[in-house]
Amino acid sequence: MAWKKLLCNLRELQLMGTLSGGQSFRWTHNKENNEWIGVFSKTVWKLREYDGDLQYQVIGSLHNQSKKSNKNKNTDYSKLLEDYFRLDVNLGQYYKEWSEKDELFEKACQQFYGIRMLQQEPVENLFSFICSQNNHISRISTMVEKLCTHYGEKICEYEGDTYYAFPEVEKLSVLGVETELRNLGFGYRAKFIQKSAAQIVEWGGEEWFLSLQDMKYKDAKVELMKLHGIGPKVADCICLMSLNHLEALPVDTHVYQIAAQNYLPHLRGKKNVTEKMYTEIGDHFRMLYGDMAGWAHTVLFCADLKKFQQRDTDTCTRDNDSNGKPTKKRKKVS
């Protein structure tokens, strides 16, 4: 299968930091050939950085296969990839502006260049982050794949593995889903998933998410927090990663530590991130970085994680409950 090129300065896109930084949980890195395989937009992709270019292969896709699709219109996979990585954003210019405002960012961006904020599909983004509550990244990935295997549509088989699209929200809204997910090891998250899915369906499904994109950030966050089991941190993740509210700033253990140690020393030594502290930290970074503060803070988040030095995937997670309070870690990170 031939590789296709996507014009992109690789200083503008770092696959390792972007795909392993806790945004999406459906990418796997093959260290031997430095290739990535993953699923988004009902398509299985292979990506690699090669000879100064971003190259990709489409392994399988559900596009143009449904009865509703236009058979005469071919899917523009390059455009899907460009949108996913938000390649229309001149990240180098923003890095320059953020570095001028913040010495810590200037230092961090030397290694963590090209960290893109993925433009994810809201349904997958929301339910993946419900799975992330009180969890570590390898188990989150396992849960997300279980959702896809049991409720998603099969895309293709490749090298002994079967790949599925993320399920439609209607599939997760059925009453029996909670019991099934508990049997699959989702614990209390099973209830959150089924009940939130039912609410979304009742409120209009995909159209409801589109309405949130048109709202102001804080209004969209309030609406998301009406969903069962969604607190401020998860709501901010959804606003930032799939609703185009780039000023949204999820505050978890790592972000609290960054803020307390480097910007807000009066917050040091606190046992829990209170609602007041959560707001103060978010507002501080928004004042510092502007209307793309969520993107800028993601670079600091990646730089703070030990996994990029130790390559230990289980240490990379926004390890908080739905209310943004630090939880006991399964692994101690030195």
Image: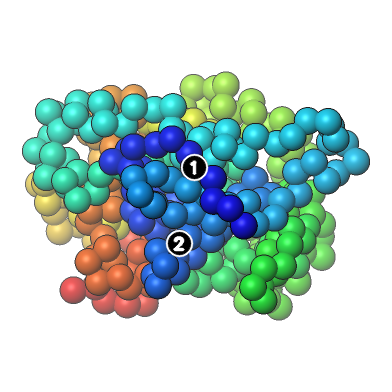
Residue count near mark 2 (Cα–Cα under 10 Å), binned few <14, some 14–19, many ≥20: some
Which of the 4 image quadrants contains residue 122? top right
Is 204 placed left or right of 330 in the picture?
A: right
Residue 71, percent from left and from top:
85, 35
**Left or right for 174, reference 255:** right
Characterize the local packing of mark 1: few (<14), some (14-19) or many (20 or more) Cα atoms within 10 angstroms: some
The quarter of the image holding the C terminus is: bottom left
Q: Name which residue type carries label 1.
A: Lys
> Pointer 2: what residue?
35
Q: Secondary structure at mark 2?
A: strand
Q: 126 or 220: which is nearer to us?
A: 126
Rendered view: 193 above or below 332: above
Identify the mark nearer the N-term, 1 or 2: 1
From the viewer's perspective, is the residue at label 1 or at label 2 nearer? 1
Q: Position of residue 247 (x, y in %)?
A: 37, 30
Q: What residue is rendered at 25% in x and 44% in y?
A: 113
Distance, label 1 to label 2, CA atoms, is 14 Å
Res 107 seen here: yes
* Quadrant in the picture for the N terminus: bottom right
What percent of the width, then of the height, locates residue 235? 49, 43
Q: Which residue is mark 1?
A: 5
Q: Judge by depth and name the residue closer to the eye, 307 or 200.
A: 307
The residue shown at (36%, 77%) is 330
Which element type, helix, strand or loop, lies under badge 1? strand
